Amino acid sequence: MPAFAYRAADKSGAQKKGVIEAASPAAARSALRERSLLPLSVETATERDLKPGTIRLPSLRRKKMTTRQLATVTRQIATLVGSDISVEEALRLVAVQSEVPAVSSILLDVRGAILDGRSFAHSLGQHPKAFPEFYRASVAAGEQSGRLTHVLNHLANFVETRQGNAQKLQLALLYPALLAVVSLGMMVLLMVYVVPDIVNVFVSRGADLPFLTRALIALSAFIRDYGAYVVLAALVGLLVYGRWARVPANRLRIHRGFTRSRLTRRFSKQFNAARFAGSLATLVESAVPLVEALHAAAAVTPNLYIREKALGIAARVREGASLRQAMTEADVFPTMLTAIVGSGESSGKLAPALGRAADELERELDALVATLVALAEPLVLLIMGGLVLMMVLAILLPIINLNNLVTM
C-alpha cells in the first residue's frame, strides 16, 4: 500500500503535514477527513513535484537514514518479528511510532512493496541509501534460510556496534581536531595582521634579518596575496577528487591502495576481516548455504578490493575448494582468521570458530583504534606547539639582534 505526503488544516485552521498510508489519493483524503482534518494537498510521498503553494519533500528514494536511526529501526523490527508479528505489520508499527517523518515514509513504502507481493529484501532495495548493500544481502539470506529473526537481531547488534564505535571515535578525535583548527586559525591571523606590522619595525631599523624571520615574512606575504586562491583551489581539488572517487574503478584503486599501503594495511585488514567474519558466522549459524553466506558477508566489507577478493573466495568454494584454501589464496585476511577457519572446518564447527575469530578481531581492532586515538592528541599538540615555537623564534630573534646592536 503506497504512502502519501499530505498537508491539512485542523478545526482551528492550523496546518499540519505528515505521511499517511492509503490505497489511493482519494482514500488518503477520506482518511484525513475522518481525523477531522481538511486536506490541502495529498501527493505520492516518493514522487512529489514542486508546485506553487505546496511544500516539497525530497525524493524518498534518495533518503538516507542515519546510522542511529537504522540501528533503532532494525532493533524494533527484530523485536516485533521475534514476537511472531509479521514483517509488514512490524514495519507499520515502527513507522507509526517513529517521530521522524522521513523514516516513517520509507518504512511505509517498504511495507507497501511487501503487500504488493515483493520479498522483504527486494522491497528494501527501493531505498539503497537507507538500507546498505550488506543489510539487504543479510535480509535476503535470512529470508531464504527461514532465520529472518536471527539475522535481524545480528543486524541490529552489528549496526548498533558500528554506530557506537563511530561515535566514540568522533568524540575522541573532536578535541584534537578543534585544537588543530583553532591553532591554525590563530596562526593565519597572526600572519595576516601581526607579522606585517612587526616587519615594518625591522625594516625601518635596517636590521639584518635571520633566515627564519625572512621565511616567516615570505610566508606571511604569500598568505595575504594568495591565501584566498589557495583555499579556492583546495575546494575545487576536493570537488574534483570527490567526483573522480565516485567512479567504481577509481574507488577500487583507492581501496586497493589502503589494503597494500604499509601505513593502513594492518588497520584495513583488521577492520574488514572483523566485518566479514562476524557476518559469515551469523549466516552460517543460521543454516544459510556457505556460498550464499560468503556472498552476503562479502557485501558487508566496506573495502571494495577485499570485497572483490571475498567474492572470489565464494567462487572457489563453489568450485569445490575448502574455505581455508580459498582464503589463503586470496591473501587479504589475517593469518589468525584463516587458521581458525581451517580448524573450524576440520572439526565441523565452522560457525562457532568464525564467531570466536570475529570477537578476537574486534578486540584487536578496538585496541588498535584506542592506540591511534591516544596518539592523535599529543601528536597534534607537538605539531602545533612546534609551529608556534618557530613563529615566536622568528619574531624574537630580530628583536634580540636589535638589542645587541644598541648595547654595542
Image (tube, rainbow, N blue to C red):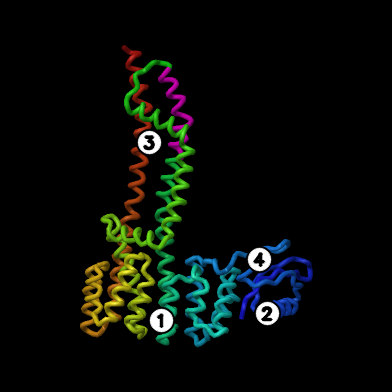
Residue drawn at x 23%, y 76% as measured from the top left: 324
Amino acid residing under circle 3: Val
Among the two numbered marks 4 and 1 on one chain, the one whose residue lies closer to the N terminus: 4
Foreground mark, 3 or 2, reads: 2
Q: Main secondary structure of the magenta part?
A: helix
Residue closest to the eye, 268 or 152: 268
Whether label 3 touches label 1, CB < 8 Å:
no
Q: Which mark is residue 388?
A: 3
Image coordinates for residue 276, horizontal then vertical, percent = 33, 72
Q: Identify residue for label 1.
A: 141
Amino acid residing under circle 2: Ser
Amino acid residing under circle 4: Asp
Q: Quadrant location of the N terminus? A: bottom right
345 with respect to 214 (left or right): left
Alpha carbon separation for disc pair 3 and 1: 57 Å
Q: Which residues are magenta?
A: 185-203
Q: Quadrant location of the C terminus? A: top left
Q: Secondary structure at mark 2?
A: loop
Among the two numbered marks 3 and 2 on one chain, the one whose residue lies closer to the N terminus: 2
Whether label 4 touches label 1, CB < 8 Å:
no
Residue drawn at x 47%, y 39% as measured from the top left: 229
Residue closest to the eye, 38 or 136: 136
Among the two numbered marks 3 and 1 on one chain, the one whose residue lies closer to the N terminus: 1
Asked if 226 appears above or below 234 in the picture, the reply is above
Asked if 370 appears above or below 379 in the picture, the reply is below
Image coordinates for residue 334, horizontal then vertical, percent = 25, 67
Q: Identify residue for label 4.
A: 49
